[in-house]
Image (spheres, grey):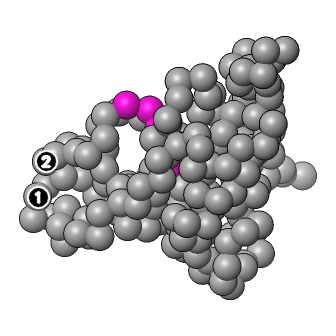
Amino acid sequence: MNEPIHKLFYVTRGNSLYTKNYCKQNAGEYPIYSAANDEPLGYMNTYDYDGRYVSISINGIAGVTKIIEGCFSINADRVILTPKTFDIDLDYVVYILEPILRNLSKGRKGINNKNEFSKLTPRMIDNVKISIPIDSNGDYCLDEMREVSKKHLNILEIKKQLNDKVSELLSTEISF
C-alpha cells in the first residue's frame, strides 16, 4: 500500500534560532543537528526532542535521511518525522524514503555528494508516498518492515566492513 508521509508522520521543521552562535551562547551537552549529516552543529543546554526519530536534511545535501536518538534539537536545515502511529518501523522508513527524497530534491547536484547544494521543503516531504507492506487484514505489517530493514542494515554493515578493508589495503606500503 502506498501511503503519503503526512498520513504516517507529522513533519516538523527545526528552529531557525539554532545557529553556531546560539550554541556558543547556550553551551551544554545536548546536540543540535543541522544540514550536516555527519555530526552536530553544536551542543546546547536544553533539547526539543527525546526519543528515536527519523530526521531529514532539507538544505545542503537535501534528502539524506537518518535516525537520531536521545535528547537533541534540530535547526531549520532539517525536519523531524514524528510518528502518528506505532506500527511503523523507522529503519524501514529511512531505507524506503531516502532514495525518493534524494531524487526529488532541487538544486545543484554534485558527484558523490561533492559540491552539492540541494533543497527540499516540508510540504514536498509531506506529499511523498512510500510503500508500506500490509497483512491479510489490511493493517500495516510491522514484521515485514522489520525484516526488510534488518536486511538493509546488514547490507550497510557489510559495506562499511568492505570500505574499512579497502582503506586498510590502500594504506598498506609495499616494499621491494
Q: Which residue is drawn at 19% across and 72% down?
A: 21
Q: Foreground: 48 or 156?
A: 48
Residue 84 location (% of width, % of height):
49, 35
Q: Residue at x 16, y 46 (%)?
A: 46
- The residue to which callout 1 is attached is 26
Task: Report if residue 52 lies within the magenta region.
Answer: yes
Dominant secondary-structure state across the stretch colored magenta: strand
Amino acid at the residue labelled 1:
Asn
- The residue to which callout 2 is attached is 45
Whichever of labels 1 and 2 marks the residue nearer the N terminus, that label is 1
Q: In this view, does 72 lie to the left or right of 79?
A: left
Residue 165 location (% of width, % of height):
77, 39
Magenta-colored span: 51-55
Q: In this view, does 106 lie above or below 2?
A: below
Estimate the spatial distance between the alpha carbons at disc 1 and disc 2, rounded to whole Å.
6 Å
Residue 108 location (% of width, % of height):
68, 85
Q: Is residue 62 left or right of residue 80?
A: right
Q: Residue at x 59, y 44 (%)?
A: 7
Residue 125 location (% of width, % of height):
60, 60
